[in-house]
Amino acid sequence: MRAIFFGEDDAQAVVRRLRADGFEAHVERERLAGEDDDEDHPWAVVTDAPAFMLEVLVDTHDGWLDEDDDGPGEQGPPLPPLHLPMAPKRIKRPDLG
């Protein structure tokens, strides 16, 4: 999971809190598409902490969550194909088919 903050101080405070609670956490610079100025890039905190804990810290330090979609095991196996009818179902006159 990642939490995004606009202030480096907020990001560092969240990392200190997560490490004090026994989780892995580090800060990296988040490059947003279309941002040209290096000073305007937000800070990302990457951690293995549970989502509910990170949500509380994000609310406290005015940031937002960016959930990773490409983590292992989050997608699950593909679903089997659906069984679809070949023709419309007759409701009014079932004797026709």
Image: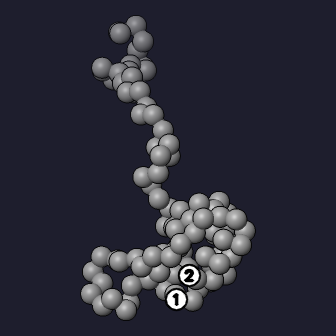
Image quadrant occupied by the C terminus: top left
Q: Say which residue label 1 marks.
A: 7
Q: Residue at x 53, y 72 (%)?
A: 26
Q: Nearest the camera: 16 or 86?
A: 16
Specify the amino acid type for callout 2. Answer: Ala
For mark 2, does the 10 Å Cα neighbourhood hold few (<14), some (14 to 19), or many (20 or more) residues? many
Q: Tell me if residue 61 comes above or below residue 74 in the rendering.
A: below
Residue 20 vs residue 62: left or right? right
Residue 45 in the image, given as x and y percentages of width and height: 53, 73
Q: Residue at x 42, y 52 (%)?
A: 70
Q: Quadrant of residue 61?
A: bottom right
Q: Nearest the camera: 26 or 88?
A: 26
Q: Tell me if residue 56 comes above or below residue 61 in the rendering.
A: above
Q: Is residue 34 visible?
A: yes
Residue 68 in the image, given as x and y percentages of width and height: 47, 59
Specify the amino acid type for callout 1. Answer: Gly
Q: Which structural element holds mark 1?
A: loop
- Picture colour scheme: one colour
Circles 2, 1 touching at the beta carbon (< 8 Å): yes
Q: Quadrant of residue 10?
A: bottom right
Q: Is residue 62 visible?
A: no
Q: Which mark is residue 30?
A: none
Q: Residue furthest top?
A: 95
Q: Residue at x 38, y 19 (%)?
A: 90
For mark 1, does the 10 Å Cα neighbourhood hold few (<14), some (14 to 19), or many (20 or more) residues? some
Q: Residue at x 50, y 62 (%)?
A: 67
Q: Say which residue label 2 marks.
A: 11
Q: Which structural element holds mark 2?
A: helix
3D distance between C-alphas at marks 2 and 1: 6 Å
Residue 37 in the image, given as x and y percentages of width and height: 30, 90
